[in-house]
């Protein structure tokens, strides 16, 4: 060990303290160190007293400084975990959030109740990195899954993720339901842009300055795309059918009302996330 070399734990402690002082999450220091060293968390813990050579330390602190300046950790590592799988991410797509895992969990819980064991035609509108459509295909291999997005670069990222995860998903370019016309759908899921333009200043800089605005913001206080979906979906749904939307935590009743107007005889409900906030709206069409 070179006398100037640090132990791994010394570099980790220094990086954690620095990020905390910069107002960033300390846990990012561990994630970035694992990325630089190519180690999982268990292997990193076992290696904490090993030396860290100067070149590796330099690369590590370059990433730490970039994150301190506001670049999301996921853009530095190029990936994020979602529903037990690793997805490629980049500035062209929204970084996966745990709340979207809850949308999938609830959908998978409802499907047997609504459909029994029949094969399903599933659509994911606004797929981004592909997390919803690909996860549904991985969890329900017999389903036919189609995923849409208005962004060609996003669809290119989603296709890479599907290839990596061996998920056969049909990707279509276009706005909302446009690419779905001409077919009938059993399950439609969407996590569309739902943040009002007026809320931009309330977002963390890592989100506002580095994630695609087309995947974040919508007009009419974030409700415009739900309004359009509620207008277009009645012509596209089979019977029975299931619709599931992720929503902003203050939009539950507004989105529920839109779906009730579109499907007056359906069972529509607002579901809360693990933090007790309204996060999903489901519509069961019998």
Image (cartoon, rainbow, N blue to C red):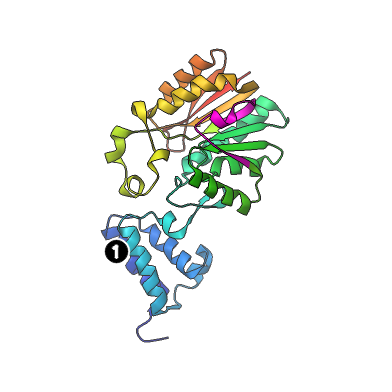
From the image, which quarter does the C terminus lie in?
top right
Residue 221 seen? yes
Front position in the image: 79 or 97: 79
Residue appearing at x 51%, y 71% in the figure: 46
Tell whether position 110 is magenta: no
Q: Indicate the quadrant where residue 164 lies.
A: bottom right
Q: How far across and how far down the image is residue 230, in percent? A: 49, 21
Up-down relation of residue 201 to residue 71 (above or below): above
Front position in the image: 53 or 226: 226
Q: Which residues are magenta?
A: 170-188
> For this view, does 247 lie left or right of residue 40?
left
Q: Indicate the quadrant where residue 226 lies.
A: top left
* Outermost top residue: 264
Residue 7 seen? no
Up-down relation of residue 136 to residue 73 (above or below): above
Up-down relation of residue 236 to residue 176 (above or below): above
Q: How far across and how far down the image is residue 201, in percent? A: 27, 40
Residue appearing at x 39%, y 62% in the figure: 29
Q: How far across and how far down the image is residue 32, in percent? A: 42, 63
From the image, which quarter does the N terminus lie in?
bottom left
Residue appearing at x 32%, y 63% in the figure: 65
Determine the secondary structure under disc 1. helix
Tell whether position 172 is magenta: yes
Residue appearing at x 57%, y 13% in the figure: 265
Front position in the image: 235 or 62: 235
Give the residue pinned by disc 1.
Answer: 18
Instruction: Count numbered badges in the picture.
Output: 1
């Amino acid at each position: 060990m070179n006398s100037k070399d640090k132990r791994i734990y010394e570099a980790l402690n220094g990086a954690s303290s620095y990020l905390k002082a910069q107002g960033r999450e300390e846990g990012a220091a561990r994630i970035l160190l694992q990325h630089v060293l190519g180690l999982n968390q268990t292997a990193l813990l076992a290696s904490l007293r090993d030396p860290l050579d100067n070149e590796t330390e330099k690369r590590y602190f370059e990433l730490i400084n970039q994150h301190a300046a506001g670049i999301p950790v996921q853009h530095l590592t190029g990936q994020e975990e979602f529903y037990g799988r690793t997805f490629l991410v980049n500035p062209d797509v929204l970084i996966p959030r745990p709340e979207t895992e809850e949308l999938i969990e609830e959908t998978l819980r409802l499907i047997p109740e609504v459909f029994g064991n029949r094969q399903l035609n599933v659509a994911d509108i606004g797929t981004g990195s592909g997390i919803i459509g690909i996860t549904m295909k991985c969890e329900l291999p017999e389903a036919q899954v189609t995923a849409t997005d208005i962004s060609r670069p996003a669809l290119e990222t989603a296709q890479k993720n599907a290839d990596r995860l061996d998920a056969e998903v049909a990707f279509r370019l276009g706005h909302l339901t446009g690419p779905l016309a001409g077919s009938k759908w059993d399950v439609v899921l969407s996590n569309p842009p739902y943040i009002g333009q007026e809320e931009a200043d309330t977002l963390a800089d890592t989100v506002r300055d580095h994630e695609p605005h087309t995947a974040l913001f919508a007009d009419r206080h974030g409700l415009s795309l739900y309004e359009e979906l509620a207008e277009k979906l009645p012509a596209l749904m089979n019977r029975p059918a299931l619709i599931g939307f992720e929503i902003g935590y203050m939009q539950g009743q507004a989105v529920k009302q839109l779906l009730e107007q579109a499907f007056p005889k359906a069972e529509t409900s607002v579901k809360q996330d693990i933090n007790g906030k309204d996060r999903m709206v489901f519509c069961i069409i019998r």
